[in-house]
Amino acid sequence: NADYQRLINISTRGDVGTGENIVIGGFIVTGNAPKKVLVRAIGPSLTAFGVAGALADPRLWVFNGAALIAENDNWSIVPAETVATAQATRDTGAFGLANGSKDAALILTLAPGAYTAQVSGADGTSTGVALIEVYEVP
């Protein structure tokens, strides 16, 4: 149906603390088939948008209930994943990340269900402002 509209991105910005004060964003994959998503934890790249106090090195975890699905620290460490993440970024219309930035990102194919994206400082002690983003990848 040409009139069908769908949400392809949701994001939230928050102050990342330590321990129980990390930032957690929930999202649900609907339907009866897995969907490909791009999940990002943006910290240092926020400074280009004038955000003061950005988290210098975010770490990203994606959970389904208590089960850890995947995690990332520094999105461009693995060359093959860097290429795929950069392509997914372009495909979704997300703003690009500088190669070598300490932002975190994952491309996942997730079964229908409820998930959380959790962001902390990579060292477990740093704090600052971060953005959690979830995009459906076409």
Image: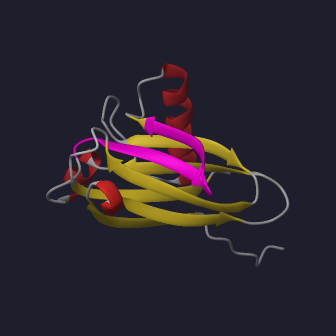
Q: In this view, does 68 lie to the left or right of 76?
A: right
Is residue 57 covered in magenta? yes
In front: 103, or 47? 103
Please provide percent x and percent y for residue 110. 70, 50
Please provide percent x and percent y for residue 50. 17, 59
Is residue 114 covered in magenta? no
| Corner quadrant of residue 6 | bottom right
Q: How many labels does the image show?
A: 0
* Colour logic: secondary structure
Residues in magenta? 56-72
Vertical placement of 14 versus 134: above or below?
below
| Corner quadrant of residue 59 | top left
- Residue visible at 43% across and 46% down? 60
- Residue visible at 23% across and 57% down? 49
In front: 74, or 67? 67
Q: Is residue 90 left or right of residue 137?
A: left
Please provide percent x and percent y for residue 51. 19, 60
